[in-house]
Image (cartoon, grey):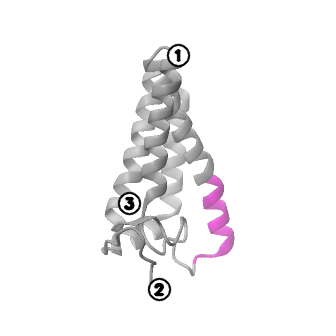
Amino acid sequence: MPEDLPQPQMILLGVVRFPTELIALGGLFWWGWSIADGGIGGIVLGGLFFLIGAALWGTFAVPNDQARNPNPPIGVPGWLRLLIEIAVLGTAAYGIWVSGARWLSETLLTLSGVYYLFSYERTVWLLKQRKFRGPGKKATS
């Protein structure tokens, strides 16, 4: 997020973003669990889905993004970060839906929409960030 964003707005956006991320990652686990009909296979597949989603979410980010780690493990352009976010959230929503919880899928999509609606400044900022920064390099201001 832009550094000049008012602090209360950043806090409010974080309050929306955090449960959205939790629902998405939990939903990915639940989808894997459902596909394998529970048991050990469900734990393994659910854990794999969860780990893939968490790895994508936490590893690839835009350097200096104030909503995330400003020094991500792998820096990517803003358009790619947005694509990753939409892919993880959309895949989780789909998985939750087909696992039988339409209401939770709709809740995830609604929270995501509210977040992106009110964080449009971050979205615009992300789209202006075009540089790729590989792993192990510090972001510059």
Q: Amino acid at mark 3?
A: Arg
Q: Which residue is mark 3?
A: 81
Whether residue 108 is situated above or below residue 131 in the rendered picture = above
Spot occupied by residue 34 in the image (x, y as percentages of width and height): 48, 19
Question: Which is more N-terminal, label 1 or label 3?
Answer: 1
Q: Main secondary structure of the magenta part?
A: helix
Disc number placed over residue 141 in the picture, else none: 2
108 shown above or below 8: above
> Above or below — where is 66 with respect to 90?
below
CA distance for labels 1 and 2 = 47 Å
Crowding around mark 3 (Cα neighbors within 10 Å: few <14, some 14 to 19, many 20+) is many
Foreground residue, 20 or 124?
Answer: 20
Which quarter of the picture shows residue 139?
bottom left
- Picture residue at 62% right of the left edge, 46% below the top: 19
Residue in the foreground of this view, choosing between 83 and 108: 83
Residue at 32 percent of width and 60 percent of height: 80
Magenta extent? 5-16
Please name the amino acid that badge 2 sits on.
Ser
Q: Which secondary structure lies at badge 3?
A: helix
Query: Which numbered disc flags the more N-terminal residue, 1 or 2?
Result: 1
Q: Which residue is mark 1?
A: 38
- Amino acid type of the residue tagged 1 in the rendering: Gly
Query: Which residue is located at x 52 percent, y 72 percent?
Result: 70
State the image coordinates of residue 123 (x, y, percent, origin top left).
42, 65
Residue 31 seen anywhere in this rendered image of the structure? no
Specify the label residue 87 is tagged with: none
Q: Position of residue 12 (x, y in %)?
A: 66, 61
Residue 117 highlighted magenta (yes or no): no
Say which element carries label 2.
loop
